Amino acid sequence: LFATSDEERYKNCEPLALTCPTCFAVFNCPSITSSVCASISKKPETDESDSTFWLKLHCLKCQPEGSTGRISPAMIANQVKRQIDEFVSMYYKGIMMCDDES
């Protein structure tokens, strides 16, 4: 096995795009690594920062106060499943090829 960083390993992957149930804005979900690194370095972060998404599970475009823009774990799971199904469908249509020989 090769020891590579997560950034290197996933550099060619499509980002997870989430849709806010309140404002219907679509945004690329920040990586969990950004949240972990920010909490380790303890840099002051604003509420709109990508690194706080995984702590608050809140739309990056909605106002942070109140329950509007809240994205529940179930909503995230459903959107992940939908996007996985889309990629599997593209694979079976021959649009996308797997480059992993195993």
Image (cartoon, rainbow, N blue to C red):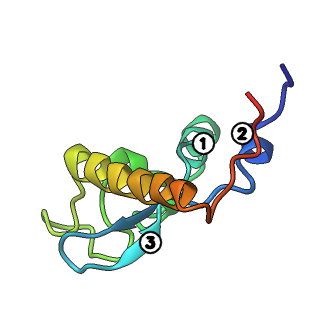
Horizontal arrangement in the rendering, residue 29 relative to residue 57 (left or right): right
Marks 2 and 1: CB-CB under 8 Å?
Answer: yes
Depth check: 17 or 86 in front?
86
Disc 2 or 1, which lies upstream in sequence?
2
Q: Quadrant of residue 61?
A: bottom left
Q: Quadrant of residue 48?
A: bottom left
The percent position of residue 99, horizontal first and vertical second, equals: 76, 45
Q: Quadrant of residue 3?
A: top right
Q: Amino acid at mark 1?
A: Thr
Residue 7 in the image: above or below residue 12: above
State the mark number for residue 33. Answer: 1
The extreme right residue here reads 2
The residue at 34%/49% (across/down) is 81
Q: What whole-number distance in Å separates the C-alpha atoms at marks 2 and 1? A: 8 Å
Horizontal arrangement in the rendering, residue 39 relative to residue 57 (left or right): right
Q: What whole-number distance in Å separates the C-alpha atoms at marks 1 and 3? A: 17 Å
Depth check: 96 or 77 in front?
96
The percent position of residue 86, horizontal first and vertical second, equals: 43, 60
Q: Quadrant of the C terminus?
A: top right
Q: Quadrant of the N terminus?
A: top right
Observer able to see residue 45? no
Circle 1 residues within 10 Å: few <14, some 14–19, many ≥20: few
Marks 3 and 2: CB-CB under 8 Å?
Answer: no
Depth check: 71 or 19 in front?
19
Q: What whole-number distance in Å separates the C-alpha atoms at marks 3 and 2? A: 21 Å
Q: Which residue is mark 2?
A: 6
Is label 3 in a helix, a strand or a loop? Answer: strand
Q: Which residue is mark 3?
A: 27
The extreme front residue here reads 93
Q: How many marks?
A: 3
State the mark number for residue 1. Answer: none
